[in-house]
Image (tube, rainbow, N blue to C red):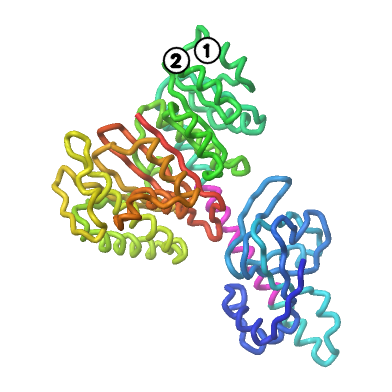
Protein backbone atom coordinates (compact mmCIF):
# COMPACT_ATOMS: atom_id res chain seq x y z
CA UNK A 1 0.00 0.00 0.00
CA UNK A 2 1.44 3.35 -1.03
CA UNK A 3 0.47 6.75 0.45
CA UNK A 4 0.05 9.80 -1.78
CA UNK A 5 -0.55 13.47 -0.96
CA UNK A 6 -3.55 15.63 -1.91
CA UNK A 7 -4.83 18.91 -0.51
CA UNK A 8 -8.11 18.60 1.52
CA UNK A 9 -9.83 21.00 -0.89
CA UNK A 10 -8.98 18.69 -3.81
CA UNK A 11 -10.18 15.68 -1.81
CA UNK A 12 -13.47 17.39 -0.89
CA UNK A 13 -14.09 18.30 -4.53
CA UNK A 14 -13.60 14.69 -5.57
CA UNK A 15 -15.69 13.30 -2.70
CA UNK A 16 -18.59 15.49 -3.80
CA UNK A 17 -18.76 13.44 -7.01
CA UNK A 18 -19.20 10.18 -5.08
CA UNK A 19 -22.79 8.99 -4.72
CA UNK A 20 -22.12 8.27 -1.05
CA UNK A 21 -21.28 11.91 -0.20
CA UNK A 22 -23.65 13.80 -2.49
CA UNK A 23 -25.98 14.78 0.36
CA UNK A 24 -23.11 16.21 2.44
CA UNK A 25 -22.83 20.04 2.60
CA UNK A 26 -19.48 21.54 1.63
CA UNK A 27 -18.38 22.32 5.19
CA UNK A 28 -18.87 18.69 6.25
CA UNK A 29 -17.05 17.46 3.14
CA UNK A 30 -14.06 19.62 4.01
CA UNK A 31 -14.01 18.19 7.51
CA UNK A 32 -14.18 14.65 6.13
CA UNK A 33 -11.35 15.54 3.71
CA UNK A 34 -9.04 16.44 6.60
CA UNK A 35 -9.35 12.84 7.84
CA UNK A 36 -8.80 11.21 4.44
CA UNK A 37 -5.61 9.40 3.42
CA UNK A 38 -4.88 8.82 -0.27
CA UNK A 39 -3.64 5.25 -0.80
CA UNK A 40 -2.73 3.03 -3.71
CA UNK A 41 -2.87 -0.80 -3.89
CA UNK A 42 -0.92 -2.76 -6.55
CA UNK A 43 -2.50 -5.52 -8.60
CA UNK A 44 -2.76 -8.78 -6.63
CA UNK A 45 -2.70 -7.13 -3.21
CA UNK A 46 -5.61 -7.16 -0.74
CA UNK A 47 -7.42 -4.10 0.56
CA UNK A 48 -9.18 -6.22 3.21
CA UNK A 49 -8.66 -9.78 4.40
CA UNK A 50 -11.52 -12.03 5.52
CA UNK A 51 -11.64 -12.51 9.34
CA UNK A 52 -9.16 -9.70 10.02
CA UNK A 53 -9.95 -6.65 12.20
CA UNK A 54 -10.73 -3.49 10.26
CA UNK A 55 -11.38 0.08 11.36
CA UNK A 56 -11.04 1.78 7.97
CA UNK A 57 -13.43 2.86 5.24
CA UNK A 58 -12.13 2.75 1.67
CA UNK A 59 -13.62 4.60 -1.29
CA UNK A 60 -12.55 3.49 -4.77
CA UNK A 61 -11.20 6.27 -6.99
CA UNK A 62 -10.01 4.14 -9.89
CA UNK A 63 -9.03 0.54 -10.63
CA UNK A 64 -10.77 -2.80 -10.13
CA UNK A 65 -11.15 -5.17 -7.20
CA UNK A 66 -13.09 -8.35 -6.54
CA UNK A 67 -14.96 -9.33 -3.39
CA UNK A 68 -14.14 -12.89 -2.31
CA UNK A 69 -16.23 -14.85 0.18
CA UNK A 70 -15.09 -18.33 1.29
CA UNK A 71 -12.89 -18.60 -1.80
CA UNK A 72 -15.67 -17.59 -4.24
CA UNK A 73 -15.75 -14.28 -6.15
CA UNK A 74 -19.12 -12.68 -5.38
CA UNK A 75 -18.76 -9.16 -6.77
CA UNK A 76 -16.64 -6.94 -9.02
CA UNK A 77 -15.89 -3.40 -7.80
CA UNK A 78 -14.93 -0.83 -10.42
CA UNK A 79 -17.26 2.15 -10.06
CA UNK A 80 -15.81 5.39 -8.75
CA UNK A 81 -16.89 6.04 -5.16
CA UNK A 82 -17.72 2.45 -4.21
CA UNK A 83 -17.28 1.95 -0.46
CA UNK A 84 -15.37 -0.97 1.09
CA UNK A 85 -14.97 -2.11 4.68
CA UNK A 86 -18.18 -0.44 5.80
CA UNK A 87 -19.85 -3.31 7.66
CA UNK A 88 -16.82 -4.33 9.69
CA UNK A 89 -16.43 -0.68 10.75
CA UNK A 90 -20.09 -0.30 11.74
CA UNK A 91 -20.41 -3.65 13.53
CA UNK A 92 -16.92 -3.72 15.05
CA UNK A 93 -16.54 -7.31 13.86
CA UNK A 94 -13.79 -8.76 11.61
CA UNK A 95 -14.14 -8.33 7.85
CA UNK A 96 -16.51 -10.93 6.39
CA UNK A 97 -14.91 -10.89 2.92
CA UNK A 98 -11.56 -10.42 1.21
CA UNK A 99 -11.20 -7.59 -1.28
CA UNK A 100 -8.50 -8.42 -3.82
CA UNK A 101 -7.13 -5.93 -6.36
CA UNK A 102 -7.48 -6.93 -10.02
CA UNK A 103 -6.19 -3.68 -11.52
CA UNK A 104 -4.10 -1.18 -9.53
CA UNK A 105 -6.54 0.54 -7.16
CA UNK A 106 -6.43 4.16 -6.00
CA UNK A 107 -8.55 4.77 -2.89
CA UNK A 108 -9.49 7.29 -0.26
CA UNK A 109 -9.06 5.82 3.23
CA UNK A 110 -10.69 7.01 6.48
CA UNK A 111 -9.40 5.46 9.69
CA UNK A 112 -12.22 5.82 12.22
CA UNK A 113 -9.70 5.77 15.10
CA UNK A 114 -8.77 9.30 14.00
CA UNK A 115 -12.07 10.55 15.40
CA UNK A 116 -10.80 9.86 18.93
CA UNK A 117 -8.04 12.46 18.49
CA UNK A 118 -10.38 15.34 17.65
CA UNK A 119 -10.08 18.28 20.15
CA UNK A 120 -12.73 18.23 22.90
CA UNK A 121 -14.44 21.42 21.73
CA UNK A 122 -15.01 19.88 18.26
CA UNK A 123 -15.74 16.35 19.50
CA UNK A 124 -19.55 16.57 19.26
CA UNK A 125 -19.39 17.98 15.78
CA UNK A 126 -17.09 15.24 14.53
CA UNK A 127 -19.09 12.51 16.26
CA UNK A 128 -22.12 13.87 14.42
CA UNK A 129 -20.09 13.60 11.23
CA UNK A 130 -19.15 10.00 12.04
CA UNK A 131 -22.78 9.05 12.71
CA UNK A 132 -23.77 10.77 9.49
CA UNK A 133 -21.32 8.55 7.62
CA UNK A 134 -22.57 5.45 9.44
CA UNK A 135 -26.22 6.24 8.66
CA UNK A 136 -25.31 6.65 5.00
CA UNK A 137 -23.52 3.30 5.08
CA UNK A 138 -26.51 1.50 6.58
CA UNK A 139 -28.97 3.15 4.20
CA UNK A 140 -26.74 2.25 1.24
CA UNK A 141 -26.39 -1.35 2.45
CA UNK A 142 -30.19 -1.66 2.81
CA UNK A 143 -30.70 -0.50 -0.76
CA UNK A 144 -28.09 -2.97 -2.02
CA UNK A 145 -29.58 -5.82 0.04
CA UNK A 146 -33.03 -5.14 -1.41
CA UNK A 147 -31.57 -5.08 -4.90
CA UNK A 148 -29.74 -8.37 -4.30
CA UNK A 149 -32.99 -9.94 -3.07
CA UNK A 150 -34.71 -8.79 -6.25
CA UNK A 151 -31.93 -10.19 -8.44
CA UNK A 152 -31.97 -13.47 -6.50
CA UNK A 153 -35.68 -13.88 -7.22
CA UNK A 154 -35.09 -13.14 -10.89
CA UNK A 155 -32.21 -15.63 -11.00
CA UNK A 156 -34.32 -18.40 -9.44
CA UNK A 157 -37.13 -17.71 -11.89
CA UNK A 158 -34.70 -17.72 -14.82
CA UNK A 159 -33.25 -21.10 -13.83
CA UNK A 160 -36.69 -22.62 -13.41
CA UNK A 161 -37.77 -21.36 -16.83
CA UNK A 162 -34.56 -22.65 -18.43
CA UNK A 163 -35.08 -26.06 -16.84
CA UNK A 164 -38.66 -26.17 -18.14
CA UNK A 165 -37.47 -25.22 -21.64
CA UNK A 166 -34.92 -28.03 -21.61
CA UNK A 167 -37.50 -30.47 -20.25
CA UNK A 168 -39.70 -29.65 -23.25
CA UNK A 169 -37.04 -30.93 -25.66
CA UNK A 170 -38.08 -34.46 -24.68
CA UNK A 171 -36.02 -37.35 -23.34
CA UNK A 172 -32.38 -36.74 -24.19
CA UNK A 173 -29.10 -38.42 -23.27
CA UNK A 174 -25.94 -36.35 -22.68
CA UNK A 175 -22.36 -37.36 -21.90
CA UNK A 176 -20.23 -34.79 -20.08
CA UNK A 177 -16.45 -35.02 -19.79
CA UNK A 178 -15.56 -32.77 -16.86
CA UNK A 179 -12.41 -32.88 -14.73
CA UNK A 180 -13.49 -30.27 -12.14
CA UNK A 181 -15.64 -31.80 -9.39
CA UNK A 182 -17.28 -28.47 -8.53
CA UNK A 183 -18.27 -27.84 -12.14
CA UNK A 184 -19.52 -31.40 -12.44
CA UNK A 185 -21.74 -30.85 -9.39
CA UNK A 186 -23.13 -27.66 -10.98
CA UNK A 187 -23.97 -29.54 -14.17
CA UNK A 188 -25.84 -32.18 -12.17
CA UNK A 189 -27.77 -29.46 -10.32
CA UNK A 190 -28.62 -27.75 -13.60
CA UNK A 191 -29.96 -30.88 -15.28
CA UNK A 192 -31.44 -32.55 -12.20
CA UNK A 193 -35.10 -31.80 -12.92
CA UNK A 194 -35.02 -31.43 -16.70
CA UNK A 195 -35.59 -35.02 -17.77
CA UNK A 196 -32.17 -35.13 -19.45
CA UNK A 197 -30.20 -38.26 -18.62
CA UNK A 198 -26.64 -37.20 -17.78
CA UNK A 199 -23.64 -39.52 -17.83
CA UNK A 200 -20.29 -38.15 -16.71
CA UNK A 201 -16.62 -39.01 -16.96
CA UNK A 202 -13.57 -37.25 -15.49
CA UNK A 203 -11.17 -38.38 -18.22
CA UNK A 204 -10.95 -39.06 -21.95
CA UNK A 205 -10.16 -42.81 -22.00
CA UNK A 206 -13.20 -43.73 -19.95
CA UNK A 207 -15.40 -41.38 -21.98
CA UNK A 208 -14.29 -42.94 -25.28
CA UNK A 209 -15.28 -46.36 -23.93
CA UNK A 210 -18.70 -45.04 -22.89
CA UNK A 211 -19.48 -44.14 -26.51
CA UNK A 212 -19.39 -47.80 -27.54
CA UNK A 213 -22.92 -49.15 -27.76
CA UNK A 214 -24.49 -45.91 -26.41
CA UNK A 215 -26.57 -43.31 -28.22
CA UNK A 216 -25.91 -39.83 -26.86
CA UNK A 217 -27.73 -36.82 -28.25
CA UNK A 218 -24.92 -34.47 -27.18
CA UNK A 219 -21.29 -34.83 -26.12
CA UNK A 220 -19.96 -32.01 -23.93
CA UNK A 221 -16.33 -31.60 -22.84
CA UNK A 222 -14.17 -29.09 -21.00
CA UNK A 223 -10.61 -28.29 -22.10
CA UNK A 224 -9.24 -31.54 -20.64
CA UNK A 225 -11.64 -33.51 -22.85
CA UNK A 226 -10.83 -32.00 -26.24
CA UNK A 227 -9.23 -35.25 -27.40
CA UNK A 228 -12.56 -36.94 -26.63
CA UNK A 229 -14.40 -34.58 -28.97
CA UNK A 230 -11.74 -35.21 -31.63
CA UNK A 231 -12.24 -38.98 -31.25
CA UNK A 232 -16.03 -38.59 -31.58
CA UNK A 233 -15.61 -36.49 -34.72
CA UNK A 234 -13.07 -38.85 -36.31
CA UNK A 235 -15.38 -41.82 -35.71
CA UNK A 236 -18.38 -39.88 -37.13
CA UNK A 237 -20.34 -40.16 -33.89
CA UNK A 238 -23.84 -38.73 -34.57
CA UNK A 239 -24.29 -36.76 -31.32
CA UNK A 240 -23.89 -32.96 -31.23
CA UNK A 241 -20.43 -31.83 -30.05
CA UNK A 242 -20.14 -29.02 -27.49
CA UNK A 243 -16.83 -27.53 -26.30
CA UNK A 244 -16.56 -25.62 -22.99
CA UNK A 245 -13.65 -23.19 -22.61
CA UNK A 246 -12.57 -20.82 -19.88
CA UNK A 247 -13.31 -17.19 -20.55
CA UNK A 248 -10.09 -15.51 -21.64
CA UNK A 249 -10.73 -14.96 -25.34
CA UNK A 250 -7.24 -13.81 -26.35
CA UNK A 251 -5.54 -16.83 -24.75
CA UNK A 252 -8.04 -19.43 -26.00
CA UNK A 253 -8.16 -18.62 -29.70
CA UNK A 254 -5.41 -21.02 -30.79
CA UNK A 255 -7.05 -23.91 -28.89
CA UNK A 256 -10.48 -23.08 -30.33
CA UNK A 257 -8.99 -22.91 -33.85
CA UNK A 258 -7.57 -26.41 -33.42
CA UNK A 259 -11.11 -27.66 -32.68
CA UNK A 260 -12.87 -25.88 -35.53
CA UNK A 261 -14.78 -29.08 -36.39
CA UNK A 262 -16.83 -28.57 -33.19
CA UNK A 263 -19.96 -26.64 -34.11
CA UNK A 264 -20.91 -25.45 -30.63
CA UNK A 265 -18.48 -23.62 -28.34
CA UNK A 266 -19.25 -21.89 -25.04
CA UNK A 267 -17.11 -20.19 -22.41
CA UNK A 268 -17.70 -20.13 -18.67
CA UNK A 269 -16.50 -18.49 -15.50
CA UNK A 270 -15.86 -21.16 -12.81
CA UNK A 271 -16.47 -18.54 -10.09
CA UNK A 272 -19.98 -17.61 -11.30
CA UNK A 273 -22.21 -20.52 -10.29
CA UNK A 274 -25.53 -19.05 -11.36
CA UNK A 275 -24.39 -18.10 -14.84
CA UNK A 276 -22.60 -21.44 -15.31
CA UNK A 277 -25.82 -23.30 -14.56
CA UNK A 278 -27.82 -20.97 -16.79
CA UNK A 279 -25.27 -21.34 -19.61
CA UNK A 280 -25.44 -25.16 -19.48
CA UNK A 281 -29.24 -25.12 -19.55
CA UNK A 282 -29.51 -22.59 -22.37
CA UNK A 283 -26.81 -24.29 -24.42
CA UNK A 284 -28.34 -27.77 -24.20
CA UNK A 285 -31.82 -26.38 -24.90
CA UNK A 286 -30.53 -24.77 -28.10
CA UNK A 287 -28.46 -27.76 -29.22
CA UNK A 288 -30.95 -30.53 -28.36
CA UNK A 289 -33.96 -28.70 -29.83
CA UNK A 290 -32.11 -27.51 -32.96
CA UNK A 291 -33.42 -24.02 -32.18
CA UNK A 292 -30.41 -21.72 -31.98
CA UNK A 293 -31.96 -18.31 -32.47
CA UNK A 294 -33.54 -15.66 -30.26
CA UNK A 295 -32.04 -13.32 -27.66
CA UNK A 296 -35.00 -14.05 -25.36
CA UNK A 297 -33.30 -17.39 -24.55
CA UNK A 298 -30.82 -15.39 -22.46
CA UNK A 299 -33.40 -13.25 -20.66
CA UNK A 300 -36.19 -13.82 -18.14
CA UNK A 301 -39.28 -15.37 -19.69
CA UNK A 302 -41.94 -12.86 -20.78
CA UNK A 303 -39.58 -9.91 -21.32
CA UNK A 304 -40.75 -7.48 -24.01
CA UNK A 305 -38.43 -7.55 -27.04
CA UNK A 306 -38.27 -4.52 -29.34
CA UNK A 307 -37.93 -5.39 -33.04
CA UNK A 308 -36.84 -3.05 -35.86
CA UNK A 309 -36.07 -3.56 -39.57
CA UNK A 310 -32.72 -2.37 -40.99
CA UNK A 311 -33.56 -0.94 -44.41
CA UNK A 312 -30.61 1.30 -45.27
CA UNK A 313 -27.34 2.83 -44.11
CA UNK A 314 -29.26 6.00 -43.25
CA UNK A 315 -31.26 4.07 -40.61
CA UNK A 316 -28.24 3.44 -38.39
CA UNK A 317 -28.23 6.60 -36.34
CA UNK A 318 -32.02 6.72 -35.85
CA UNK A 319 -32.13 3.06 -34.80
CA UNK A 320 -29.36 3.54 -32.25
CA UNK A 321 -30.92 6.71 -30.83
CA UNK A 322 -34.30 5.02 -30.48
CA UNK A 323 -32.71 2.05 -28.73
CA UNK A 324 -30.69 4.22 -26.32
CA UNK A 325 -33.77 6.30 -25.49
CA UNK A 326 -35.65 3.09 -24.70
CA UNK A 327 -32.94 1.83 -22.35
CA UNK A 328 -32.50 5.24 -20.71
CA UNK A 329 -36.18 5.23 -19.77
CA UNK A 330 -35.57 1.84 -18.10
CA UNK A 331 -32.87 3.46 -15.96
CA UNK A 332 -29.82 1.94 -17.69
CA UNK A 333 -26.68 3.91 -16.82
CA UNK A 334 -24.85 6.05 -19.37
CA UNK A 335 -21.60 4.09 -19.02
CA UNK A 336 -23.38 0.93 -20.18
CA UNK A 337 -25.22 2.76 -22.97
CA UNK A 338 -21.92 4.03 -24.36
CA UNK A 339 -20.76 0.43 -24.81
CA UNK A 340 -24.16 -0.61 -26.19
CA UNK A 341 -23.96 2.23 -28.70
CA UNK A 342 -20.51 1.13 -29.87
CA UNK A 343 -21.59 -2.48 -30.28
CA UNK A 344 -24.86 -1.67 -32.05
CA UNK A 345 -23.05 0.55 -34.57
CA UNK A 346 -20.69 -2.31 -35.43
CA UNK A 347 -23.57 -4.80 -35.69
CA UNK A 348 -25.52 -2.50 -38.01
CA UNK A 349 -22.47 -1.73 -40.16
CA UNK A 350 -21.88 -5.45 -40.59
CA UNK A 351 -25.56 -6.10 -41.44
CA UNK A 352 -25.54 -3.40 -44.12
CA UNK A 353 -22.10 -3.68 -45.71
CA UNK A 354 -20.60 -7.10 -44.87
CA UNK A 355 -23.47 -9.58 -44.56
CA UNK A 356 -25.48 -9.17 -47.82
CA UNK A 357 -24.56 -11.75 -50.47
CA UNK A 358 -25.95 -12.70 -53.87
CA UNK A 359 -27.32 -16.11 -54.91
CA UNK A 360 -23.74 -17.34 -55.44
CA UNK A 361 -22.73 -16.30 -51.93
CA UNK A 362 -20.64 -13.34 -53.12
CA UNK A 363 -20.55 -10.16 -51.03
CA UNK A 364 -22.55 -7.31 -52.57
CA UNK A 365 -21.54 -4.20 -50.62
CA UNK A 366 -18.40 -5.31 -48.81
CA UNK A 367 -16.15 -3.42 -51.25
CA UNK A 368 -17.78 -0.04 -50.55
CA UNK A 369 -16.39 2.63 -48.21
CA UNK A 370 -18.50 2.74 -45.05
CA UNK A 371 -19.55 6.30 -45.90
CA UNK A 372 -21.34 5.09 -49.05
CA UNK A 373 -25.13 5.13 -48.89
CA UNK A 374 -26.77 1.71 -49.24
CA UNK A 375 -30.49 1.06 -49.68
CA UNK A 376 -31.30 -2.60 -49.05
CA UNK A 377 -33.90 -4.49 -51.09
CA UNK A 378 -36.49 -6.28 -48.93
CA UNK A 379 -34.78 -9.69 -49.31
CA UNK A 380 -31.47 -8.18 -48.14
CA UNK A 381 -32.78 -6.45 -45.02
CA UNK A 382 -31.74 -7.43 -41.52
CA UNK A 383 -33.55 -6.95 -38.21
CA UNK A 384 -32.46 -5.42 -34.91
CA UNK A 385 -33.77 -6.62 -31.53
CA UNK A 386 -33.23 -5.37 -27.98
CA UNK A 387 -34.61 -5.90 -24.48
CA UNK A 388 -33.69 -5.90 -20.78
CA UNK A 389 -34.87 -8.04 -17.88
CA UNK A 390 -33.19 -5.97 -15.15
CA UNK A 391 -30.16 -8.27 -14.94
CA UNK A 392 -29.05 -8.25 -18.57
CA UNK A 393 -29.47 -5.80 -21.38
CA UNK A 394 -29.46 -7.65 -24.71
CA UNK A 395 -29.19 -6.49 -28.30
CA UNK A 396 -29.00 -8.53 -31.49
CA UNK A 397 -28.94 -8.11 -35.24
CA UNK A 398 -30.17 -10.92 -37.50
CA UNK A 399 -29.39 -11.16 -41.22
CA UNK A 400 -30.94 -13.60 -43.75
CA UNK A 401 -27.66 -14.88 -45.23
CA UNK A 402 -25.92 -17.26 -42.81
CA UNK A 403 -22.55 -16.44 -44.38
CA UNK A 404 -20.52 -16.00 -41.20
CA UNK A 405 -18.10 -18.86 -40.53
CA UNK A 406 -16.11 -20.01 -37.50
CA UNK A 407 -12.91 -19.42 -39.46
CA UNK A 408 -13.82 -15.78 -40.07
CA UNK A 409 -14.68 -15.15 -36.40
CA UNK A 410 -11.47 -16.73 -35.12
CA UNK A 411 -9.20 -15.31 -37.82
CA UNK A 412 -10.45 -11.74 -37.37
CA UNK A 413 -10.31 -11.90 -33.59
CA UNK A 414 -6.84 -13.41 -33.63
CA UNK A 415 -5.49 -10.73 -35.99
CA UNK A 416 -6.87 -7.96 -33.78
CA UNK A 417 -5.60 -9.45 -30.53
CA UNK A 418 -2.18 -9.69 -32.15
CA UNK A 419 -2.45 -6.05 -33.19
CA UNK A 420 -2.41 -6.79 -36.90
CA UNK A 421 -4.27 -4.32 -39.12
CA UNK A 422 -7.29 -5.58 -41.02
CA UNK A 423 -6.90 -5.43 -44.80
CA UNK A 424 -10.16 -3.53 -45.26
CA UNK A 425 -9.04 -0.93 -42.70
CA UNK A 426 -5.88 -0.38 -44.74
CA UNK A 427 -8.12 0.29 -47.73
CA UNK A 428 -10.30 2.69 -45.77
CA UNK A 429 -13.34 0.42 -45.78
CA UNK A 430 -13.66 -0.42 -42.11
CA UNK A 431 -14.14 -4.17 -42.20
CA UNK A 432 -15.74 -6.89 -40.10
CA UNK A 433 -12.42 -7.85 -38.46
CA UNK A 434 -12.05 -4.74 -36.36
CA UNK A 435 -15.82 -4.68 -35.90
CA UNK A 436 -15.93 -8.19 -34.43
CA UNK A 437 -13.16 -7.28 -32.04
CA UNK A 438 -15.03 -4.14 -30.93
CA UNK A 439 -18.21 -6.16 -30.41
CA UNK A 440 -16.59 -8.88 -28.27
CA UNK A 441 -14.51 -6.43 -26.21
CA UNK A 442 -17.39 -4.05 -25.41
CA UNK A 443 -20.08 -6.63 -24.60
CA UNK A 444 -19.94 -8.83 -21.50
CA UNK A 445 -20.88 -11.86 -23.61
CA UNK A 446 -21.30 -12.22 -27.38
CA UNK A 447 -23.17 -15.15 -28.96
CA UNK A 448 -22.86 -16.02 -32.66
CA UNK A 449 -25.73 -18.18 -34.00
CA UNK A 450 -25.44 -19.32 -37.62
CA UNK A 451 -27.51 -21.56 -39.88
CA UNK A 452 -25.41 -21.78 -43.01
CA UNK A 453 -26.98 -20.03 -45.98
CA UNK A 454 -30.09 -19.16 -43.99
CA UNK A 455 -29.46 -16.83 -41.06
CA UNK A 456 -26.81 -15.22 -38.85
CA UNK A 457 -27.65 -13.76 -35.45
CA UNK A 458 -25.18 -11.92 -33.22
CA UNK A 459 -26.42 -11.42 -29.64
CA UNK A 460 -24.61 -9.17 -27.17
CA UNK A 461 -25.32 -9.20 -23.43
CA UNK A 462 -24.43 -6.47 -20.93
CA UNK A 463 -24.79 -6.65 -17.15
CA UNK A 464 -27.24 -4.04 -15.91
CA UNK A 465 -26.43 -4.68 -12.24
CA UNK A 466 -24.54 -1.71 -10.82
CA UNK A 467 -20.79 -2.02 -11.11
CA UNK A 468 -20.65 -5.50 -12.61
CA UNK A 469 -18.45 -5.52 -15.69
CA UNK A 470 -16.73 -8.57 -17.09
CA UNK A 471 -12.91 -8.11 -16.90
CA UNK A 472 -12.51 -10.76 -19.64
CA UNK A 473 -15.36 -10.49 -22.15
CA UNK A 474 -16.05 -13.74 -23.99
CA UNK A 475 -18.07 -15.27 -26.80
CA UNK A 476 -20.06 -18.41 -27.64
CA UNK A 477 -20.88 -19.76 -31.08
CA UNK A 478 -23.47 -22.20 -32.43
CA UNK A 479 -23.43 -23.43 -36.04
CA UNK A 480 -25.90 -25.67 -37.87
Q: On the image, which quarter does residue 89 sit in?
A: bottom right
| Residue drawn at point x = 29 percent, y = 32 percent | 452
Q: Residue 211's mark?
A: 1
**Residue 27 at what x, y percent from top left?**
66, 89
Q: On the image, which quarter does residue 58 sit in?
A: bottom right
Q: Is residue 194 above or below residue 412?
A: above
Q: Is residue 136 magenta?
A: yes
Quadrant that contains the C terminus:
top left
Local SS, label 1: helix
Q: Residue 237's mark?
A: 2
| Residue drawn at point x = 25 percent, y = 52 percent | 308
**Residue 178 at what x, y percent from top left?**
60, 27
**Image side of residue 134 versus residue 383, left or right:** right
Marks 2 and 1 in Cβ contact (< 8 Å): yes
Q: Is residue 229 above or below residue 427?
A: above
| Residue drawn at point x = 66 percent, y = 84 percent | 29
**Residue 234 at what x, y percent from top left?**
46, 16
Name the foreground residue: 475 vs 48: 475
Start-end of magenta stretch: 133-154
| Residue drawn at point x = 60 percent, y = 19 percent | 204
Amino acid sequence: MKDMKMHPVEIAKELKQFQFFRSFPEDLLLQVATLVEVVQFPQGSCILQENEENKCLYFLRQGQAEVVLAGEVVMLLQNTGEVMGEMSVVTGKPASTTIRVLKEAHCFKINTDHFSFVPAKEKDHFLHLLYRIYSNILADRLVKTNEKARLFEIANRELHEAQVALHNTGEKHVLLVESDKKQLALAKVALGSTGVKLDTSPEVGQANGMLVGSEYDALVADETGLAFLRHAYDTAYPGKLVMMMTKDVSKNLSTIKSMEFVDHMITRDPTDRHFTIRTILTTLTKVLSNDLFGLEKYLTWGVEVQNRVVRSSRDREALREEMCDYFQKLGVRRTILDRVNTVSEELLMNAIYDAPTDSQGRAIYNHLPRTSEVLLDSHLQSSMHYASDGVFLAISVVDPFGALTKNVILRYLESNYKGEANLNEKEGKGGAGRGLHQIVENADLTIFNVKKGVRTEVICLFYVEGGKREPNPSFHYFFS
